[in-house]
Image (cartoon, rainbow, N blue to C red):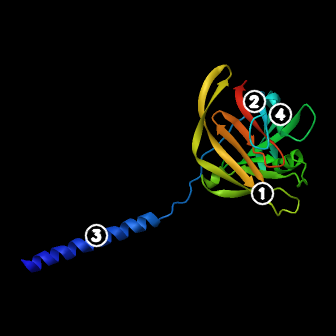
Amino acid sequence: MVNVTRATRWVALFCLCALSLSCREDGDTTVDPQPIPFSPKFVAGETYVYDAVALDEFGYMIPSTRSRASWKVLSTGTTLPGFSSVTTILDSASILRDTTGVYDTVMVASTPSGDLYRFGLMATIARIRKQPVPEDRWECIAAFSSGSGSSWVVGYQDYGRSQPVYGRIAGVTDMFTVSVKGQLTVFPAYRVDLSGVEFDYSFWVADAPAAFLLFRLEPNMTVGGAELTLSDIR
């Protein structure tokens, strides 16, 4: 009887150790981030209306700077070297760009894998902040093909390419309420964070409907920032 009891205990101990090892191996298993399907379809003629406000060096909104701004889609599907789908946008959001003119143009492009590119974002931010300006180039602002949680090099803040800016996509979406052609609509958007040395810039983007929902350039201790929130798609 004693031998049977001891044997039973050894079997139980063996099973417990095996279960513990199995759980440990499962816990150590790493899962590669999965690509996020993303296929924005901008429409020529549509206009995105934003509420814009400047931020002081501490990140607080400056009420006296509140204004309305718009992005109007001028063209879509343009082919340029390296891209088969480029969208050109007429930008009136002077609060978050480097020129004093009434309008400017923004070019964004998407790839078959869903990645988003923008032309000259690093140079634009450098001009806004009166810093040395890097070369205008196409920069990957949202690497959806890498999945959430992964990081990638967006571009460089300086001409010598010694100050990289990294991007990261949040693992969950945020919900936004926007008037789409007169109808109040709720839909999800992905948050994308771009960060570097004294550089923090975030935006939320969706593909159904295709829209940039919110832009936020964080201030630092020497210069303020800005925030634009989408209110209407017309």
Kind of element beneath mark 1: loop
Q: List the residue tagged with mark 4.
A: 93
- Name the spot of residue 157 as percent of width and height, x first: 83, 56
Q: Are marks 4 and 2 in contact (CB under 8 Å)?
A: yes
- Name the spot of residue 113 as percent of width and height, x first: 66, 50
Residue, far top: 182
Residue 50, which numbered label? 2
Q: Which quadrant would residue 163 be assigned to in this image?
A: bottom right
Q: Nearer the viewer, mark 4 or mark 1?
A: 1
User: In the figure, is residue 38 to the left or right of 43?
Assistant: left
Q: CA distance from mark 4 to mark 1?
A: 25 Å
Q: Are marks 3 and 4 in contact (CB under 8 Å)?
A: no
Q: Nearer the viewer, mark 3 or mark 1?
A: 1
What amino acid type should be assigned to the residue bearing mark 1? Val
Of labels 2 and 3, earlier in sequence is: 3
Q: List the residue tagged with mark 3.
A: 16
Quick check: 145 above or below 5?
above
> Which residue lies at the image location 81% right of the left edge and 51% below the top edge?
138
Of labels 2 and 1, earlier in sequence is: 2
What amino acid type should be assigned to the residue bearing mark 2? Tyr
